[in-house]
Amino acid sequence: MVDKHKVDKSMADNTKADRVGIIIDGCRYEVDAGENLLQACVSLGLDLPYFCWHPALGSVGSCRQCAVIQYQNDEDDSGRLVMACMIPASEGMRVSLQQETARQFRKTNIEALMTNHPHDCPVCEEGGNCHLQDMTLMSGHIKRGYPGTKRTHKNQQLGPFLNHEMNRCIACYRCVRFYRDYAGGTDLDVFGSKNHLYFGRAESGVLANPFAGNLAEICPTGVFTDKPYSRHYVRKWDLQTGAAICSNCSLGCNINVGERDGLVRRISNRYHAAINGHFLCDLGRFGYEHVNLGRRLEQPLQRNNAERATERLGAKAAKALLTEIINQNSSHQGETDNTQTKAGCIALGSARSAIENNAALLRLVGKDNFYLGVPDAQAAMLRQLCDAYSQGRVKPTSMKDIEASDAAFIIAEDISHTAPRLALTLRQMSRNAGKAKALTFGVQIWQDDAVRNLTQSLRSPLHILASHETELADVATQNLVLPLEGQLRLLRAVLALLTQTPPTETHTETQIDPDPLSGQAGEIVADLLAARRPVLICGTQSNEPELLRLCLEIAERLQARPQHDKDQTGFYGVTRHANDLFLGLIAQAQSLTPSPLGIDALLSRLADEPIETLIILETDLYRYCDKDRLDKLLDRVKQLIVIEQQLTPTAQMADLLLPASSFAESQGCWLSAEGRLQFSFAAMPAIEGRAQAWQWLSEAREQQAHTQTQTQTQTQTQTQAQDEPRGRSELIAWVAQALPALAAINAFAAPLEFKTLSPFPIARQPLRASARTAIHAGQHVREPQPPADPNSPYAYSMEGVAGFRQAQTQIISVLPADAWSPKWNSDQAGSLRTALLQSPQDSGLGLSEGPPEPGTVPAPGADPGADAQASDCWRHGICIFSQTEPGSIPVTVSAPEATTAAQSVAAQSADVLPAGVWPLAPDANRYADAELACLGDAIRAAMPEARVRLHPESADKLGLVQGDDIRLSRYPSPEDCESADVCLSCTLDAAVAREQLLVPTPVFMRLGHLARVIAGPHGTQGGEHD
Amino acid sequence: MLSQIRTLITVFRHTFTKADTVQYPEEKPYLAPRYRGRIVLTRDPDGEERCVACNLCSVACPVDCISVQKTEAPDGRWLAESFRINFSRCILCGLCEEACPTHAIQLTPDIEMAEYDRQNLVYEKEHLLISGPGKYHDYNFYRHSGKAIAGKGKGAAVGERAPIDTRSLLP
């Protein structure tokens, strides 16, 4: 029974109530109380067709497909027809799925739905992956009996991501319920009446919501289909799937990468209860096309300056050359022992590369010569985050917990763009007040319509502090649009209110007049304190360590409040790249050095001393630095080795260029912003000339170590090089030892070992994958052996444990549990069932507590009893900070970062600045900021034009009108060379804070917090007007 | 003893019966018009390719010898960018013809495909495409399908009404 008193206070525990026994077709089953009957049936693995219900969207009972017979009591033998999705399972309830009336009803219903369905399954992208196909078959409707004509619809152009084919619609309303109710979109709706319903936009146009791509997955038939997938379409049964981690932002969403014939064909959602649940953002779903680019690097290249030519190298030759360069370096270093540097080889790591790659580089060059692939300010912020996490001062929260919290404060992070999936989570969070209200009325959360009716405009408090109005503004209680200086002021006021000291104590400037922001600060503090589970969202977008310091302090204070249980105060620090937090951990390990070793530190070192060898791993320096300056600096490096996926401007400067494999071709560990360590599997093998960076580097290191200790024996090094699995596990062991905070990574040392339940590999291809003997016959009629994959439990073929058995025999399955079992074949139904079967209680509406996250994970295969827990680390990842208590990990507390001159200037208000100098703020864009993803066609089509956004008042000051060009240059301008200008057109926008210019993130990263506006409208010298 | 004699008689009798074996290359055996041999890709009555690259032949093939890649023509039709069949694997079972929803694949009685080099048994689309409709003279998939292509808009297929006006509230 649901304890109502408990429920309204603790929404988190409502569905964890007892189990009830229900009788379905004479068999007794135990299901969760309060769950709807349809969900119960699906969780039990029974076949009950449905369309409109979705665990994340709840029930509305609009498709009438899940009809069952409910009996009044034991004597009742006729019963009555009910919709299973609309009735809660209750103790002793007796229902029948198989009774003839119910079956006939379902069959007739689907026959009616199909009367207008077009005759186009062969040319439908959904074919073979279609819930409607499956349900039609399941219901037993085979032959069209209706002789009449079909109604038709005109389609719309919906932008670069989705195709629209309205004729296929069965009017289940899932699309508008997701798009409008769940994702907060406004430009998709339902029009018309009765069987003239039309789901689309008012007129053709790009769907504005960044989660529109989910429509392709959520539509039970082919009305909305994945457009980029359609361009290189193959049927679902031909996809070779790898269980990967999305590397486009720092959230670490779980994805399935579908590959065929060397091309990534599509990305679909892989259910993870604590992160992405059932939905992905469009960047994650469509941001893979860079992997397929023909201009990607395919072979190691060597610059030959003597002949002004580029030489192509084989993989072996490149490895030998790399070894030679590095060895030469170390031996050269031994002779002319420079007092300044210990090794002439320095390296720049990457925030968008897996942990293994960075670790191999770190091991090769040593901590003091390793620079983090982010600007110094970012590195400092990452270190702040890692320090706070590992000292146990604040604990990062999972997205599931954020969804369950009841008040949020988003600080200076435009999460709709820097971490889109998190924005969707917060949108659901804002509904919690309404859900709580519904529970007090005894309405179940899954009664979607009723809950929304009760909710009306009631929302959980959500305060947003930003330099412009964000996309979450419509659900926010309070939108605070302030420039950086104002943001800092507000945060100080909040902090002061939390510490119960006058707000003027910390900051003397504001002492003179009472801060006008204290009112807003008061509201924020009141809401945060009133909430049971408040959550703070901040991040590194602002590029201002001081701001992050304040956020962390606020989080700490909030946790210290007596009414808050420590675990129930949430904190999420969004970072810019997928592996940023790992760089933070390295920065922590480097904490002996006074300032963080970021890109700026690297550049100044390059300027200061001649460098023998510089190894750059997957970072494009030209994104952070002016071209002229960087050209000169890189020219001073004798040997520039770049390991990169694409031919970036940095890669073009390389003396030796080694192609790196993309996320789809590599397996490795990623550390999400939440501190969740996850393992990403490859979907396809890398071609001969490409390899993961650690594979390139580890051999060079082995030979280096070898030559240093003893005379080189060729045979020995060769055997070492062949032993790759050992190479990786050795590397992982080294990481665990070098970075104590990351000791849990040992659990991922041997991917082969989690395959404990079956002696066979897991098939990446479904059982029904086709064209095996023809697909490569164009090159040669002899069928090649499938590529071997000795390091992973998966096979690049259909051999091994088939998809639909994986859930039974394997700990981690790449395919939905029932893929290619008849009936529940489509991805959406399959993944939904996987989620339900996996963990019945945490598939619901995000309000329930899942199984506890594993904190310490035993070595895989240590004892059979630990299997379940070992499996969790592969399926759920490991939260490396979840167990840290204050003081549990000794950390050398770094001195508070000395803020550089530019940063302290940035924190001043605009009127203190010299004339013509304006503060800049980053205007993030999810597509344009994604360095690799924006190379793909679909993402590029979705990218907005780069422009400066400013408030009309600011524009007046500058004498600008809409569309004028604005020219910005770095302030203060660097001494060593002339700084290049950035010229952008400007857009006037009243939703932007006054006294600042909002510039695209790449421009912001290059210019910093301040810029001199040197040319106003039409190229005339107009910047000095004010 | 008796059985040996009977065997001898049987063998002796066969000396005078007509041989089933024919001198094949010179003398052709009779093959029924619907004999299952090499496949062809046919065209619809309007001369357009029937194959829509739906991949059903590929998945139906028991020896996995058909590989199809879909592309889209400017007029909106789905087309096979490549259609490859490896006849050195093909067992001429006809399941691809049965699976084909557009009558594009049709089996012909041609079984004379011997080659010295196996590579020559890999047929691409241009080797398979014929210029006529084959056994089904009238069928045109796009005339029945709800998918719009250039020249046949929504509501113009067989058994369809004109597209509805979403702004109308009339019954």
Image (tube, coloured by chain):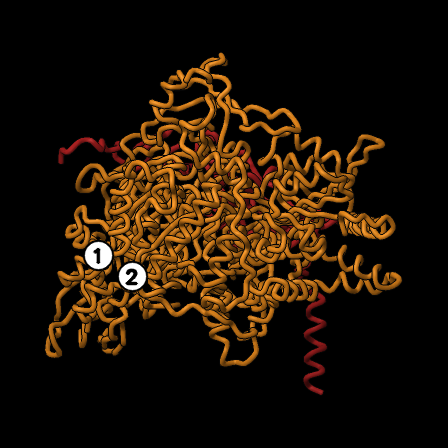
Quadrant containing the N terminus of chain A is: bottom left
**Residue behind mark 2:** A847
Chain A drawn colour: orange
Percent position of residue A948, x then y: 44, 27
Q: Are marks 1 and 2 in contact (CB under 8 Å)?
A: yes
Which residue: 53% across, 43% down?
Answer: A377
Q: In which quarter of the image is residue A305?
A: top right
Percent position of residue A124, x then y: 41, 44
| Residue A901 visible to the viewer | yes
* Chain identifier of the residue bearing label 2 in the image: A
Chain B drawn colour: red
Which residue: 47% across, 38% down?
Answer: A927
| Residue B25 visible to the viewer | no
Q: Which amino acid, mark 2?
A: Leu
**Residue behind mark 1:** A435
Q: Which SS class for mark 1? A: helix
Percent position of residue A360, x then y: 67, 56
In this rendering, the answer to whether A659 lies above or below A582 is above
Quadrant containing the C terminus of chain A is: top left
